[in-house]
Amino acid sequence: MKLNFTSKNQFVLSICTLFVISIFNSSVCAQTVVQKYGRLQVNGSHVTAENGDKISLAGMSLFWSNAGDGGDFYNSQTVNHLADDWKNPIIRAALGVKETWDGGTGYIDNTVAQKAKIRTVIDAAIAKGVYVIIDWHTHAAEVYKDEAVAFFTEMAELYGSYDNVIYEIYNEPINQSWNDVKNYATDVIAGIRSKDSDNLIIVGSPTWSQDVDKAAANPITGDPNLAYTLHFYANTHKQFLRDRALAAMNDGIALFVTEWGTTDASGNGGYNPQESEIWLNFMIENHISYVNWTVAHKNEDSCVVSPGLGVQGLINGNLTTSGIFIRNHLIARAEALSIDDFTINNVKLSLDQNPVKDVLSVNSTIVIDDLTIYDMSGRSVFYKSVNQDHPQVNINNLHSGNYILKVGANNTSTTTKFIKL
């Protein structure tokens, strides 16, 4: 290949471009997210990859399937765009069960149409290699327990062999007691397990799925792959709920944030990126996966698509302020959770934390000679000779952003991506 340059700056830019391409070119044939992490498992107080590695996946939730301003996003085009453009590894299909406002469009009154919507999203997610949460989206699930048992038993029979599938059997109880929720959940879990013995199941808790402490005090027993949902909205639920979440995890239950927003709990008003960042850092540091509310074009601040613009608004990038914030975060997280191999001479390496605040720490069973950090233009911004099998270096002086780490050992090297907070 012959390269022609008209200036020194063009030459330098081209070299940097080639450097970045060479680092990322392996992603062309990379595994899908689900191939990498496998069937998600509960290990102690965490939902982990199948091999037990702690993870924190960041994804998106669709709006109520029975709502006109969100239900039209239930198609493969939405799933594919979010996976390709937003680098979204997990999508939540919020099956609207029955609401006073839905005009008979919910699952109870319009079963065939709603089931078709949900199955379209599930099939698209499986084809794309991302996870999908099948969510029984109601505040009164126990009223429709028989229908829930039948629905989830059918979904388990159809999709239980796919590692992609996660069952969320109660979105948000409100005034129900934990015993009410637990009794309902026990029957639905039995239906799922009659067809699917091991895919992850997630259960809500009272007070809009915030009373995880009540679930931790009296957990559902007998199922080793069961987690509990935590819901929050950043401008309403702050440190008190993070404290409650940590206490519940310390008591031994695993959490999965299946719904969170950047706004007030109403979903409209109070956009708070600062508090959202505090929550995001909390979930990343504590290895909690989280799914943002919501992919819709309703005139509410928590929706990511500009009002009234539909799927084409999503495709064309007509996003709300919250939508821009969330898309940028998901793309950054995808780079941090690169599924490319991070190995030297078939020895797997890993980072203790990613994103990283101050100290970058590399786990290895072989001695590492040196560490080099590059910014995304390919410019070296850090180098240190370490000669250790678990080197730790202070990167506090680096600006927040995305970086490439090159690890050298035994006259060879490997690279990975990380985020500096």
Image (spheres, rainbow, N blue to C red):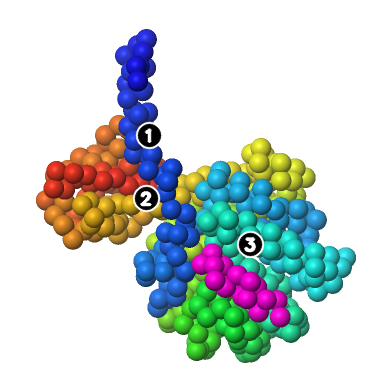
Residue 21's mark?
1
The image shows residue 87, relative to residue 389, as above or below, that is: above
Mark 1 residue element: helix
Q: Is residue 251 visible?
A: yes
Q: Going 32% across and 32% down the picture, which residue do you hit?
A: 19
Estimate the x, y position of residue 65 in percent, counting from the top left: 74, 62
Q: Going 30% across and 37% down the picture, which residue do you hit?
A: 374
**Amino acid type shown at disc 3:** Ile
**Amino acid type shown at disc 2:** Asp
The image shows residue 19, relative to residue 184, as above or below, that is: above
Q: Residues within 10 Å of mark 3 (few under 14, many from 20)?
A: many
Residue 340's mark?
2
The image shows residue 130, relative to residue 110, as above or below, that is: above
Estimate the x, y position of residue 8 in percent, counting from the top left: 31, 14
Q: Residues within 10 Å of mark 2 (few under 14, many from 20)?
A: some
Distance (Cα) linking label 3 and label 1: 33 Å
Could you say which is closer to the camera, residue 50 or residue 86? 50
Whether residue 324 appears in magenta in the rendering, the answer is no
Q: Is residue 239 visible?
A: no
Q: Quadrant of residue 133?
A: bottom right
Task: Mark 3 and mark 2 in contact? Answer it, CB < 8 Å.
Answer: no
